[in-house]
Image (tube, rainbow, N blue to C red):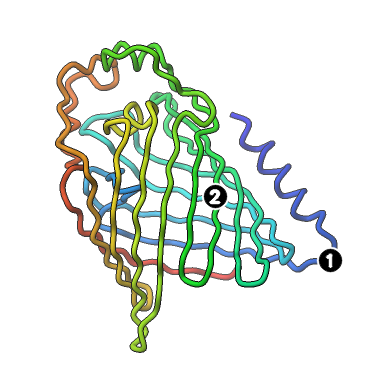
Amino acid sequence: MKRSGIWITALALSMGSGTAMAQLTANASVTNNYLWRGLTQSLNQAAVQGGMDWSSDSGFYVGTWVSNVEYAPGDPYSYEHDIYFGYSGESGDITYDIGWLYYNYDALADIDFHEIYGTIGYGGFSATAYLLGGTEANEAAYESDFAVTGADFGFGEAYYLSLDYEFETESGLVIGLHAGHHDGDFMTWFNFAIDSYTDYAISFGVDNFTFTISDTDLDSVDPSGLSAPFMSGLDISTNDNGEPKFVLSYSVDFEL
């Protein structure tokens, strides 16, 4: 992996921004279900997560984050380790954030991938786009396992678009509304979903606790016909990604 080089390059770019002050923070959380874009990443079981972020007043930032994962009983996944860097700022009432995000998993999973992303916000509203940058996953294996032809895991061939709105009530309760749409061959291979789906969520946050209700327009997954060696005998229908999910999480942030 070339993650170390990417990390150093991003850090050097951030440090080269003149006399701007820098901040190092850490975060930790525990949740009864790790959801990513409406799909469980932990077989609807608990996950422990944490990360660190370095940011500059100039807008540059770099960070890392880790969580336990599992997609089917006995699969080769045990962890997800993300590395990212980007630049955020504002112009008047408009906020923006652009960056790069790398997802690293166990070597046997052979599924690492990376995305570029961009967000524009106004008030409590935000719109975000993620584009697949590349992956080590094999298109030929995907075509064989899912009995399809013409699969494309190339740049921009999978994407995720989301719209979010967040507001705080007078009592201090933070309410978030979310809708997202995922498309592309790679999502079928990565999360055993159809290549196009939409997810919805509403969340309620107070202090360090967040309760989320999430659902998708996916049907139940039929695991028959999957022949990839690491999926042999696995019941991937146990993820229940076509059913509503109720998630309670607790998170804390630290300044270092």
Residue for badge 1: 19
Residue 64 is marked as 2
For marks 1 and 2, give the CA distance.
Answer: 24 Å
The quadrant of the picture occupied by the N terminus is top right
Along the line of sight, the residue nearer the viewer: 148 or 82: 148
Labels 1 and 2 touching (C-beta < 8 A): no
- The residue shown at (50%, 34%) is 132
The answer to whether 165 is drawn above or below residue 133 in the figure is below
Left or right: 99, with 147 as reference point: right
Looking at marks 1 and 2 on the same chain, the residue that comes earlier in the sequence is marked by 1
Q: Label 1 is placed on what type of residue?
A: Thr
From the image, which quarter does the C terminus lie in? bottom right
* Helix, strand or loop at mark 1: loop
Residue type highlighted by circle 2: Thr
Q: Residues within 10 Å of mark 2 (few under 14, many from 20)?
A: some
Crowding near the residue tagged with mark 1, few <14, some 14–19, many ≥20 C-alpha atoms within 10 Å: few
The residue most toward the bottom is 170
Taking the spot 40% from the left edge, 70% from the top edge, the residue there is 166
Picture residue at 36% right of the left edge, 76% below the top: 174
Position in image of residue 244 (x %, y %): 17, 52
> Which x, y percent locates residue 190?
35, 31
Look at 65% across and 38% down and name the residue there. Answer: 4
